[in-house]
Each structure stands twice: as C-alpha cells, then as structure tokens.
Amino acid sequence: MAVMKSMVLRGLVIYFVMSFFRKPAAPVGPTSGPQVVNSPALNIFENGTLMDMYVFLSENEQFNDFNDPKSLVWHKENLVYGDWYGGPDLDGSYSTSLTFPTSQKLRNNGSIFLHVYVTKNGYSPDPKSASYSGKNVAYAHKMLNKFKKQHYIKTHNLLTGETAASAEHQKKAETTKKEIVSHWHPNMTINLITDFTNWVQGSVPPPLDEYVVFLPGGKYYKPVVYMNDYWNMQRDYQPINDTTLELKLQLTFQPLSLLRWQLYAAQSMKNKWTSGVFGDSFADEEEVDQDSLKEALLETSPYLLGLTFAVSILHSIFEILAFKNDIQFWNNRKSLEGLSVRSVFFNVFQSTVVLLYVLDNDTNTIVRISCLVGLGIEIWKIHKVMDVKMGARKILGFIPSIQFKDKGSYVESSTRQYDMMAYKYLSWALFPLLGSYCVYSLLYEEHKGWYSWVLNMLYGFLLTFGFIMMTPQLFINYKLKSVAHLPWRMMTYKFLNTFIDDIFAFVIKMPTMYRLGCFRDDIVFFIFLYQRWIYKTDPSRLNEFGFSAEMEKEAITKGAQTEEVKPIEDSKPIEEKKKD
C-alpha cells in the first residue's frame, strides 16, 4: 500500500507538470452561435519595467487600511521587472527583517495576513488614491500563521506514577486530548514570476489558472505574485499562545522563473489533493516526510541525489516484484523441506503486534490498512505450511476450535528437528534480551497504561532485535548443507531493497543508532550469500529420502530408453489385430 500510494502521488505530480506544456483541446460539438476565440494575451509588465512593492501586515483577510502607517512593513521602490542580477547578493533578491507585537486576538488562535502589492513605478495600491490604476497593480495575500493539530496524551511511569509533562499538558490530555493551535514560521518569500508566455484566457492549465489574472478583454494579464513557503520546515513552526508577546518575520523578495513556479504550484496542489482525499492527519505526515526530502535537496551532493532518485524508482519496482514472487512461491510450494515453519507463525505474531500498535496510536487510515493487508498475507501462509481443520470442541459453547497439524513433508523430513533446535538455541538469547528490554521500558519510559506498555515494549523489541529471527533459517541451511529450498528470487528483490535503504540512510537525516540499524539485514544477507557459495549443488549427495540427483537422472534416462523400445515390441501384435 505504501509503494502504491507513493507511485500514485508521483504519477499525479508528473501529470500536472506535463499538463502545463500540453496545448488546450479544441471544443467539440455544435455551437449555438458564432464561436468566440480568445487571442493570446501579453504580460502588461514588459521586461525592464520599473516597479514599486508595498507589503502590509493585517489581521483582516480583506485589506483596506492603506492610511495606517503601522500596517506598511516594507516599501521597496524602483525594482526592475526581469532583473535577475540586482540586490546585495547580485541574484535579484532583497530581504528585510521585522519584529511586531502580537494582539490578544492573535494569541487566541487568531490569524494574520500578508498583503503584497506590486505596482508600476509611480502608481499607488490604494483604490482611493488619485494615482491608482487597477490594471497596473498586481496583488497577492497569504495567511502567515498555520493551524496544526496538537495531540495531548496522558502518560506516566507505571511504577512510580510520575510524569515529565507539565500540569497544563496533563489537564488537556484528560479533557480535550486534541487541540488546534496556531503556529508561526519566521520566514516568507515573495516571488514575482518573470514570464512572458502568451496565455489564452480560459485555457491556462491548473493550478496556474488560480494565479493568472487577465484584464477585461483578455488581451493582457498581470504578473503573478506568488507567496512561497515551500522551504519552511515543519519542525521550525512554533505555537502561538498567551506567552507569545511578539513575533519575528524575515521577508525575501526574489524573481522566479516559470518552470520553477510550475514545480512549486504542482507541489502545492498535491498537498491540497492529499489533504482532501486522505485527511489532515495523512497530510501532516506527508509534510513531515517532505521535510526529509527538503533536507536531502539542500544538504546532499547533486550526484548522490541523482543516484538516490534513480534507486528510489528501482526500490518501488523491487518491492512489487518481491511481493509477487513471495505469493507465487508459497502458492506453488508442495514440500516444506528446508523451510522454517515457526518463522511463519512468528511473522504472524510480529504483524499482529505492529497492527495493534498502530491502532493504539494516532496513525492515518492508509497505514492501518497496509498493516492489516500484511497481517492477512502472513495468516494466508499458515494453511500452506500446516493442515488447518475445524475441531469438534466448541469454545464458549458456540465458537468452533481450530486444530493445527504439521504437514507430512515437514514431519517426515529432518527440517522439523532442525527448526525446533534452532528456536531452542535462539530462545537462550531472545528471552534474556526481551526481559532486559521489558525492565528498561518499565523503569525509564512513560506509557498510557499497561496495555500500551505491552504493545510499546513488544514493538520496540521487535524493531530492535527482530532481525535475529532470520537466523533459524541460517541454522537449517547449515544442517541440511543446502540452500536450494529458499525463495531466492523474492529474497534477492528484498535484499536489493535493503541496500537501497542503506543509501537512503546516508541521504536522509536520522539518528545514528537508527542509521546503523539499517545495516543489520545486510549482515544476514551476506551470510545467506556465503551459504549459497559453499553449499553448491552436489549431484551425488543423498537427500533425506535416500535419493540423489544422479539417481534421478539415471532413472529418467532408463525411462526414456524403455519408451523407445516399447513401440517396436508392441508393433507386431497391433498389426495382427488389424488383420483379424
């Protein structure tokens, strides 16, 4: 589900970007009158036009306080439209910083807006002014604060009852549990799109049509003022409350090309679409994931970034192929020789813990569905490795019991003995680690309750030590001196994905211990590769049934010779029968 979701979102972004360059389709069908064809429009701001910029700060979405000097926070004169080399840094950008006091309304989840007017030099943005000209004024506004959901969970140490959370946090956890709080980010970029495309009114592709404003008649359009907050990291947003007496704001003016604007607009449209379809909680998680992508774009070498983009596509392909081959392997499997049946049951237990964990925590529906599908696949594997029957005994008088019995190919082979032996040795290391992690979680971590503690403890333990559950298969391979029974195609796809995850571990910012944890599966895979190298195919080696590949080949050869002789022996009786 995660892979399909990622592919769908990527496809939508590509579709929207490509639609910008697609010519509008001609209208099809009969018309009741003479058809009006709009002519291509021109940008009313020619290249090199002198401009003035007025930036106002107001708590009203509709701005009219042009006579209030406190509202005007930035006035820049004699800007040049299409100037890419102006400013102190010779990149066409200008910036300013300001600090303003917050009102009581803003501190109580109010809103504050930034109103930007770009006019031709000498014109006023005030409609009441004599020097006002509406066609020579480009305008945009944006709400600077952002409303985000803040969750309050009551946690405490189960032994002492103490908590590190404040009294206010605990009170809200008991009453509201969830609150919408206004947040503030101190940066905003004002982009003026430098574009001379001959747009046709009514044919501008979405979402650009939301920004391009045509003058009456459709022969001219105003330049687009785009309020860009794409590079604002979610972690930098701070809540606005009663203690927030003043706020800081860094404003940057910068020209922007059409191509880059299309990318920003497509990303903005994708965020709106994600929020509308999957909900706000999913959109919030998407924004957090985008922070990691933004950090990678800002801090990573372009060559490594290009490599990451290429392997991310391979990651999606390998994930689908691994899923297909996993289902195909277990669906066609007739013998269980060499396969660890107990690992299948442990995977069911692990998937159940993960599902209960995400249900206990505030996660989006897509994650829950993906965990449920994963659990369903693991449960489906049970009837492939064991005989499942309905028992005669009833639970609570009406629920039929289920009986599990090992399949014949598993009982008759030595795999069952090796599987039991492997889990016996594994338990010597697993249970002490589980006990230690249990004590650590109980002493040093806070939980909502005992049920939450059990889930968090099991989930954390599986996340930390779950990789060692692949070691019983290594032990069975060692005892059988063979790896021919393994689903190598599926394993190859999955282990290729682990190497791709290793690349992401260097690109995406994450804790060091978690980054080191990405290399644990690689160690197990290299052991599998070593076993595949040393346990080469031996045609003379007998299996547990007393047969070898040479004996099978010899039997097939004798059978073929017998088939060749039989027609000669039977030909005479057949001819005699025909005569009779």
Image (cartoon, helix red, strand yellow):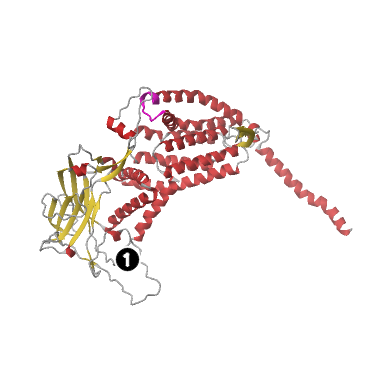
| Nearest the eye: 380 or 110 | 110
Which picture quadrant has residue 552?
A: top right
Q: In which quarter of the image is residue 108?
A: top left
Q: Identify the residue shown where x is 85% and y is 56%.
A: 575
How far across and how far down the image is residue 187, in percent?
A: 22, 46
Q: What stretch is highlighted in magenta?
A: 440-449
User: Is the residue 110 above or below the residue 162 in the image?
Assistant: below
Is 289 magenta? The answer is: no
Q: Is 209 positioned to the left or the right of 580 in the image? A: left
Within-10-Å neighbours for mark 1: few <14, some 14–19, many 20+: few
Q: Where is residue 301 in the image (x, y as percent from the top left)?
A: 31, 44
Task: Work out whether 310 lies above or below 80.
Answer: above
With 354 as the anchor, is 284 left or right in this view? Answer: left
Name of the residue lying farthest toward the bottom: 34
Judging depth in this view, the residue of 367 and 480 nearest the camera is 367
Q: Position of residue 545 (x, y in %)?
A: 67, 33
The one of 533 and 203 positioned closer to us in this rendering: 203
> Seen in the image, is 93 located left or right of residue 547?
left
Vertical order, 432 against 515 (above or below):
above
One can see residue 283 in this view: yes
Identified at 56% across, 39% down, the residue is: 381
Asked whether residue 541 appears in the rendered view, the answer is no
Q: Position of residue 19 (x, y in %)?
A: 36, 60
Q: Does the magenta stretch include residue 442?
A: yes
From the image, tell me which residue sits under label 1. 203
